């Protein structure tokens, strides 16, 4: 009787049986890595905008406060995207002829909105409120990163739930005095291991981790 | 048969028909698979089962398109058919492991001819069972959230929920059952490889046989592996349905929150599992002429197991009623009264008829020796066990503590379509199995062949003797 299999089948079967395990584990690991990569989360990816607005220039260069443009950040859930009029408070006086700013002037003339590309967009099933985070000492840069160093804005963090909940579980690792929340160069004056728990007590910070805190 | 030398003549009824040799056993079982002519009935059966699979696919498609609203679920009855059918199928899936593992360890030789297809039945039943909770989660494409893996949500699943324990219990059970079944198949796959005529089938069976040559070392390792798997599977027989019963017992719903649930569920599972084995074995032995291998002794033993486990189940019913009264809790008492005389009272009395009254017929040896009666009783028990889950799920949920939240549950046509669809899937897989794999373990059956002058009498654990006798030639035992 002729052999059913070539002798190489022995090697092939051993490789496929043992290799299969590593292949499956490797594939799962790859999916996990991909899922956390900037390709999916957009963290660290510079976003193109209709007008090349530079936070670095306006914040670090000119010293404009966050709240000059993001007016509702202390009172409302939404920080606020400035209206074209906010831009024009300065740009009706300076750089009035700059070609770079033509879309701004055009929007002002036609009373249309500039279609900014949103950089931080949470899914609709997650409720988020800027005002409470500021009131409890979460600084702008804690979530948004060094915005004053961003020529064009990018998302500093993944906005994955594991990132949110890291702070909600241990707020003492991240909070600062509420007076310092807009400080882009903030460094804790005393060790965070002492300051954090004190702030949590003082400000009654409850890092809420029940589902309905965010998924209302 | 039963010559005085035969070691298998317990009580006179044989576990294998007379006149068989090692070769005839191998021939008769393997020819079902290797035959060139498939019986017409097989095609008809497969066709009907495929209609069921079509129904299943339609029901799932409709459900995914419209959502769980197409089912009859509502508040307060949020579980309905999905859980009833899940528990029913999982219960049916218990006979396989019981027969394979526990009866193996107890050296019950009569298990040999029914273990293979009971294990296959177990696997298929677990597959059918899995369909229901998977769809019941509402978004089956996110069902992997049930597994603890390092996810981007920074969350673990709720380890305190019995619904999660279910995931582990059922997936472990499915894995071990599949391994057990496959490992047990390997020597027979080698036999099929050696006997197949076409190169394609030689290759297919050969690849599945994993290079089995029947060497003494192969048999030694096989025995070790099979024994270990039997040891692993044994606690699973008890644990899986215990965990399923926790879905109910860990809640605070009247009628569910009871310590009787785990043993009562396990007994019910074995009860329904054996009923399903009988339901399948009786027509199969008839159609394929396997009366010599699945003898009246087997049917009789299975009937006795059904009777015994049925009595445990009925003890469970009695205790449920007793506890409801003895607890003094108005909610428990009302639950029992509602179960018996409420709007679903018909289902309770049908259940009592099917599971308590009808199986009492099995006390009679005459009934146990009538194939038709056994078949009918097995069907009745299958229906009864489905009704049991219906009663448990629906009557407890539809009227709980607050009368203002009472309601009624009516399954829709899509509930029924999905249920019938899984039955179609079950038989579809079963038809494929009996056509392409040996439905009875050939090498284990060979060990039951009574000793002749040429064969040394075999004693002790039969796997060992199979190893010894098969060591001589490749996939097959030594032919006399």
Image (cartoon, coloured by chain):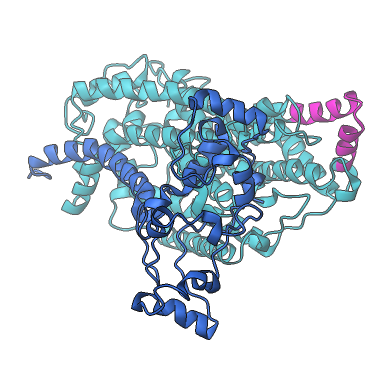
- What x and y, as percent, mark residue A182? 52, 47
Question: Could one spot residue B264 in this view of the protein?
Answer: yes
Q: Is residue A67 magenta?
A: no
Q: Which residue occupies 80% across, 29% down?
A: B320
User: Vertically, is A74 above or below A189?
Assistant: below
Q: Main secondary structure of the magenta part?
A: helix
Q: Residue furthest front?
A: A93
* Side (left or right) of B42 relative to A30: right
- Res. B250 image quadrant: top right
The C terminus of chain B sits in image quarter? top left
According to the colouring, which chain is blue?
A
**Figure label count:** 0
* Residue B2: percent from left, percent from top: 43, 23
Whether the magenta-drawn stretch holds residue B317 is answered as yes
**Residue B15 is at least partly visible in this image:** no
Judging depth in this view, the residue of B354 and B67 nearest the camera is B67
Q: Is residue A177 above or below residue A80?
A: above
The quarter of the image holding the N terminus of chain B is top left
Q: Position of residue A116 (x, y in %)?
A: 46, 69
Residue at (29%, 25%) from the top-left corner?
Answer: B222
Which of B344 and B148 lies nearest the eye of the viewer?
B148
Check the rendered structure and report the hue given to chain B. cyan
> With B312 as the anchor, is B332 left or right in this view?
right
**Residue B177 versus residue A33: which sits nearer the camera?**
A33
Q: Dividing the picture into quarters, in which one does residue B264 lie?
A: top right
Query: Which residues make up the magenta segment?
Result: B314-338
Judge whether B270 appears above or below A78 on screen. Answer: above
């Amino acid at each position: 009787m002729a052999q059913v299999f070539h002798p190489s089948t022995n090697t092939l079967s051993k490789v496929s049986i043992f290799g299969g395990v590593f292949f499956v584990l490797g594939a799962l690991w790859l999916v996990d890595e991909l899922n956390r990569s900037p390709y999916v989360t957009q963290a660290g990816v510079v976003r193109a905008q209709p007008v090349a607005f530079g936070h670095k220039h306006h914040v670090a260069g000119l010293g404009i406060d966050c709240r000059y443009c993001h007016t509702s950040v202390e009172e409302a859930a939404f920080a606020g995207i400035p209206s074209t009029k906010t831009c024009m408070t300065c740009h009706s006086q300076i750089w009035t002829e700059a070609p770079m700013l033509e879309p701004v002037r055009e929007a002002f003339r036609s009373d249309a909105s500039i279609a900014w590309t949103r950089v931080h967009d949470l899914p609709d099933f997650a409720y988020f409120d800027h005002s409470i985070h500021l009131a409890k000492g979460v600084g702008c840069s804690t979530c948004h990163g060094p915005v004053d160093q961003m020529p064009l804005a990018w998302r500093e963090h993944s906005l994955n739930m594991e990132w949110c909940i890291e702070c909600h579980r241990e707020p003492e690792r991240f909070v600062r005095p509420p007076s310092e929340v807009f400080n882009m160069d903030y460094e804790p004056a005393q060790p965070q291991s002492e300051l954090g728990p004190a702030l949590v007590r003082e400000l009654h910070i409850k890092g809420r981790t029940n589902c309905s805190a965010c998924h209302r | 048969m039963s010559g005085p030398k035969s070691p298998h003549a317990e009580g006179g009824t044989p576990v294998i028909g007379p006149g068989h040799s090692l070769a005839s056993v191998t021939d008769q079982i393997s020819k079902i698979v290797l035959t060139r002519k498939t019986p017409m009935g097989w095609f008809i059966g497969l066709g009907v089962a495929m209609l069921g699979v079509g129904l299943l696919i339609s029901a799932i498609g409709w459900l995914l398109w419209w959502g769980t609203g197409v089912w009859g679920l509502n508040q307060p009855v949020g579980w309905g058919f999905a859980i009833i059918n899940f528990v029913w199928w999982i219960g049916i899936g218990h006979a396989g492991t019981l027969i394979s593992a526990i009866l193996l360890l107890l050296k019950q030789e009569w298990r040999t001819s029914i273990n293979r297809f009971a294990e296959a039945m177990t696997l298929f039943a677990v597959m059918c069972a899995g369909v229901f909770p998977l769809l019941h989660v509402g978004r089956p494409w996110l069902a992997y959230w049930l597994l603890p893996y390092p996810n981007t949500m920074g969350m673990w699943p709720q380890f305190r929920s019995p619904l999660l324990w279910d995931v582990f219990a059922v997936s472990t059970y499915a894995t071990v059952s599949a391994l057990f079944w496959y490992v047990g198949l390997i020597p027979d796959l080698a036999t099929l490889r050696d006997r197949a005529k076409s190169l394609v089938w030689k290759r297919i069976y050969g690849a599945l046989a994993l290079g089995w040559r029947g060497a003494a070392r192969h048999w030694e390792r096989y025995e070790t592996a099979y024994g270990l798997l039997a040891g692993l599977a044994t606690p699973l027989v008890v644990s899986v349905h215990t965990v399923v019963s926790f879905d109910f017992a860990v809640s605070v719903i009247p009628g569910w929150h009871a310590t009787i649930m785990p043993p009562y569920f396990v007994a019910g599972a074995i009860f329904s599992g054996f009923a399903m084995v009988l339901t399948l074995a009786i027509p199969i032995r008839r159609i394929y002429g396997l009366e010599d291998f699945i003898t009246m002794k087997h049917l009789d033993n299975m009937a006795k197991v059904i009777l015994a486990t049925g009595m445990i189940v009925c003890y469970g019913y009695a205790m449920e009623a007793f506890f409801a009264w003895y607890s003094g809790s108005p909610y428990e008492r009302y639950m029992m009264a509602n179960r018996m005389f409420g709007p679903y009272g018909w289902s309770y009395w049908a259940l009592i008829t099917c599971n308590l009254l009808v199986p009492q017929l099995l006390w009679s040896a005459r009934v146990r020796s009538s194939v038709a009666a056994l078949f009918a009783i097995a069907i009745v028990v299958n229906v009864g066990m489905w009704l049991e889950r219906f009663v448990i799920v629906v009557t407890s949920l539809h009227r709980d503590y607050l009368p203002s939240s009472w309601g009624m549950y009516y399954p829709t046509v899509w509930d029924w379509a999905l249920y019938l669809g899984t039955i179609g899937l079950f038989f579809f897989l079963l038809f494929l199995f009996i056509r392409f794999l040996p439905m009875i373990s050939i090498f284990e059956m060979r060990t039951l062949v009574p000793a002749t002058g040429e064969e040394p009498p075999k004693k002790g654990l039969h796997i060992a003797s199979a190893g010894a006798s098969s060591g001589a030639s490749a996939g097959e035992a030594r032919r006399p």
